[in-house]
Amino acid sequence: MHGGIISSLLDETIGRSIQAIDDSVWGVTVELHMKFLKPVPLDQELWAVGFITSQNRLLFEGEGYLTTPQQEILATCKAKYLKQHVKKIVSDMDFIEEQWIFVADDHMPEIFELPL
């Protein structure tokens, strides 16, 4: 998989992790630091995991990783985001109500230590 696509997946995943705390807030990327550890295959299931490591009133920082179901970490990311209200980004209320939501996944593995 191309590194730009991997970066986009992890940026989106970490940026949306703030919605687990406040579903009206979106993360707008300020900084993004990627590490590509192994080639990413196109023909298997992958998991993108993101979580918040610190936050204040305006910003939050997060980390994430792309992994196989066997917990082989393929890429890692550390990033910083500006907190932005979702209505400042998307004006279509139907889109906000239908698409701009946090969905818990019962099949997600436990988060494990990042090799950063």
Image (tube, grey):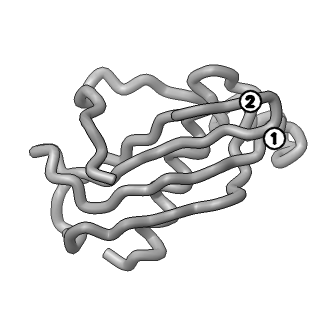
Q: Which mark is residue 17?
A: none
Q: How many marks?
A: 2
Residue at 47 percent of width and 75 percent of height: 4
Residue 42: image quadrant is bottom left
Residue at 81 percent of width and 36 percent of height: 58
Residue 35, percent across and down?
Answer: 37, 66
Crowd rating for badge 1 (residues with CA inside 10 Å; few <14, some 14–19, many 20+): some
Residue identifier under label 2 = 56
Q: Is residue 93 above or below residue 46?
A: above
* Label 2 secondary element: loop
Residue 40, percent across and down?
Answer: 24, 69
Please identify the quadrant where the N terminus is shown: bottom left
Left/right of residue 87 with respect to residue 66 in the rendered view: right
Residue 9, percent across and down?
Answer: 46, 58
Q: Is residue 112 above or below residue 14?
A: above
Residue 30: image quadrant is bottom right
* Amino acid type, callout 1: Gln
Q: Residue furthest front?
A: 116
Residue at 44 percent of width and 56 percent of height: 77
Q: Residue furthest bottom?
A: 2
Residue 95: image quadrant is top right
Left/right of residue 12 with respect to residue 60 in the rendered view: left
Residue identifier under label 1 = 84
Q: Nearer the viewer, residue 105 or 12?
A: 12
* Label 1 secondary element: strand
Left/right of residue 105 with respect to residue 24 in the rendered view: left
Query: Of marks 1 and 2, which one's residue comes earlier in the chain?
Result: 2
Crowd rating for badge 2 (residues with CA inside 10 Å; few <14, some 14–19, many 20+): few
Residue 75, percent across and down?
Answer: 32, 61
